[in-house]
Image: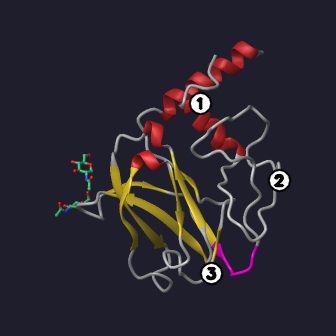
Amino acid sequence: MFRRLALAFAALLSVVSAQLTITSPGPNDWWVASSLNTISWTCSTSPYQNFTILLANSNTAVLPAPLAIIAVQYNYDCSKTITQQQSAQPAGTGYTVQFASTLNSTDIYAQSEPFEIKALGSSYPTTTSTAGSTATGTASGSAGAAQATTTGGTLAQYVPVGMSMVAALALGLVVA
Ligand SMILES: *[C@@H]1O[C@H](CO)[C@@H](O)[C@H](O)[C@H]1NC(C)=O
Ligand SMILES: *[C@@H]1O[C@H](CO)[C@@H](O)[C@H](O)[C@H]1NC(C)=O
């Protein structure tokens, strides 16, 4: 049993290696309009040292073109809290975060899954831990399962269960 798990983890690890993946926001990891929001990525496997962070929307009526919200973001930060001003976009669905070359913002390194910006006052996604930079992932069942610590009006760094697993794996904390 354990060995099988270890093999599965190793397989997952090989998939994640040398990749930049935006782990948050995502489908279950929305933003709240005009509030503090978090972007997290797989910094330990990223081949890039820095990037420009853009906010895009598949609907050009919402955003005609990707909007740069951070000109130069260093990979080693691993996550970034976006201020109210930086995420001053209307509530809506179909948003994506893009990481692009700082020299050419159409050279996209990574793109998040689509996510929603919910109206001001909505609650943040339920959180699992203070993962992010301190990935202490333990294998705790299905991804996204709510191990809720509701974050009310304040921002806590959040990483879905599945993602903190990946981060922990990437850091070599879990693989046997
Ligand atoms: C970003 O990283 C590249 C190497 O990938 C480096 O050449 C460049 O100087 C860095 N830019 C900044 C602003 O640190
Ligand atoms: C910017 O990147 C895009 C996509 O990789 C590429 O097609 C385009 O030629 C690049 N532009 C410049 C000025 O390098």
Q: Residue at x 65, y 44 (%)?
A: 131
Q: CA distance from mark 2 to mark 1?
A: 22 Å
Q: Residue at x 41, y 35 (%)?
A: 18
22, 88: nearer the viewer? 88
Among numbered discs 3 and 2, the one appearing first in the sequence: 3
142, 169: nearer the viewer? 169
Q: Which residue is mark 2?
A: 148
Against 45, residue 59 (above or below) is below
Q: Which residue is mark 3?
A: 91
Against 163, residue 73 (above or below) is below
Q: How many marks?
A: 3
Among numbered discs 2 and 1, the one appearing first in the sequence: 2
Identified by mark 3, the residue type is Ala
- Report x, y in % for residue 102: 28, 60
- Report x, y in % for residue 7: 63, 18
152, 10: nearer the viewer? 152
**Magenta portion: prevailing SS class:** loop
- Verify whether residue 89 appears in magenta: no
Q: Are marks 2 and 1 in contact (CB under 8 Å)?
A: no
Among numbered discs 3 and 1, the one appearing first in the sequence: 3
Say left or right for 50 vs 11. Answer: left
Q: Secondary structure at mark 1?
A: helix
**Quadrant the C terminus occupies:** top right
Q: Residue furthest front?
A: 154
- Magenta range is 117-122
- Report x, y in % for residue 68: 38, 71
- Verify whether residue 121 appears in magenta: yes
Say left or right for 14 vs 35. Answer: left
Q: Secondary structure at mark 3?
A: loop
Identified by mark 2, the residue type is Ala
Q: CA distance from mark 3 to mark 1?
A: 34 Å
